Image: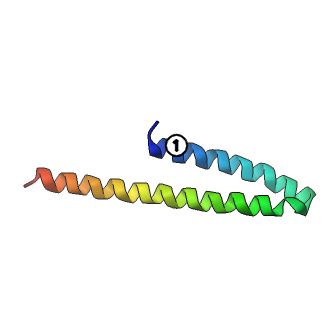
Amino acid sequence: MNAPATITSDLLRLHRARDKVARMVVADPAYAPIFQRIEAEIAEAEAMDDIVARARAVAQNARGARTSR
């Protein structure tokens, strides 16, 4: 499995978990730390997704520059 697909599936899983835990927090605020941790993991995964996208663009541009020489 390639990295972008893994990142996307991880994000989907995290978003689903966040949605479930949000309902739990509403019922009992004791679950708030879990909600915060999941939100932090989502932010980290989204940042990684952004890094992969930027690296892909740089690699594409470098490949294009190499072939146009």
Q: Tag count in the figure?
A: 1
Residue 24 percent across, percent down from the top left: 86, 53
Q: Residue at x 80, y 56 (%)?
A: 22
Q: Residue at x 73, y 48 (%)?
A: 17
Q: Is residue 1 left or right of residue 29?
A: left
Q: Quadrant of residue 42?
A: bottom right
Quick one: label 1, few (<14), some, or many (20+) residues within 10 Å? Answer: few
Label 1 SS? helix
Residue 29 percent across, percent down from the top left: 89, 63
Residue pointed to by mark 1: 6
Q: Residue at x 54, y 46 (%)?
A: 8
Q: Is residue 52 left or right of residue 7?
A: left
Q: Quadrant of residue 25?
A: bottom right
Q: Nearer the viewer, residue 61 or 1?
A: 1
Vertical relation: 2 (above or below) 62: above
Quarter of the figure that contains the C terminus: bottom left
Q: Quadrant of residue 35?
A: bottom right
Instruction: Name the kind of residue labelled 1 in the image.
Output: Thr
Residue 55 percent across, percent down from the top left: 35, 57
Vertical relation: 39 (above or below) 9: below
Residue 39 percent across, percent down from the top left: 68, 61
Protein image colouring: rainbow
Q: Residue at x 18, y 53 (%)?
A: 64
- Residue furthest left as drawn: 69
- Residue furthest top as drawn: 1
